[in-house]
Amino acid sequence: MPSTRAILYTGKTTTTGGRNGQSHSDDNRLDIKLSVPGSNGAGTNPEQLFAAGWSACFIGAMGHAAQELGIALPANTTVAAEVDLGSDSEQGFFLQGRLNVSLPGLEHALAQSIVDRAHQICPYSKATRGNISAVVAAV
């Protein structure tokens, strides 16, 4: 039986000026200044935006993973995301990331199983798999 795919949402943004520019969404809900990482600029940077998007999506994926196990995520679940921008003399620029997940009140083995399952179903994790070094862990 063929799979059925449906587009659930399309995020649309327009960016000008690159890393020292500005980005806004078509619905005007996002309107941000961008700055080079580590600079004194007034804006955020693509690595922070990616970290925020990945961590938010990952919490949703953990909710699905927990639901598969018949449990609810703790209300104070957090994901601390780190996205590195690096440079390699052979490969050029690269990204790598880490998600450190806190699931207070859950046994570590159970928490790690939820994290592992979420990493399999999260769209951001799927996009990174095989493309960047990514480590996800219950802490």
Image: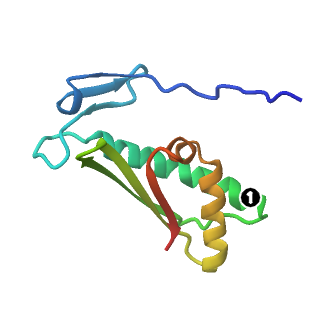
Answer with left or right where residue 29 lies relative to residue 32. right
Q: Nearer the viewer, residue 2 or 102?
A: 2
Residue 28's spot in the image, x, y percent?
A: 38, 23
Q: Quadrant of residue 2?
A: top right
Give the left or right position of residue 3, taking residue 87 as reference. Answer: right
Question: Which residue is under mark 1?
Answer: 67
In the displayed structure, 100 sits above or below 57; it is: below
Position in image of residue 93 (x %, y %)? 28, 42
Q: Is residue 106 visible?
A: no
Residue 82 pos. (x, y %): 36, 57
Q: Residues within 10 Å of mark 1 (few under 14, many from 20)?
A: few
For the view shown, which residue lies furthest in the left direction? 40
Quadrant of the rendered image containing residue 21: top left
Vertical placement of residue 123 versus 117, above or below: above
Q: What secondary structure is marked by label 1? A: helix
Residue drawn at 59 percent across, 55 percent down = 119
Q: Nearer the viewer, residue 116 or 93?
A: 93
Q: Is residue 117 left or right of residue 80?
A: right
Residue found at the very far right of the displayed protein: 1
- Outermost residue, front side: 90
Residue 102 location, x and y as percent?
51, 69
Say whether residue 133 is left or right of residue 9.
left
Q: Quadrant of residue 29?
A: top left
The three-letter amino acid code for the residue at tag 1 is Gln
**Viewer can see residue 112:** yes
Please give the name of the residue rendered at 49% of the width and 74% of the height, measured from the top-left corner.
139
Q: Is residue 20 above or below residue 69?
A: above
Tell me what residue is drawn at x 41 percent, y 19 percent.
26
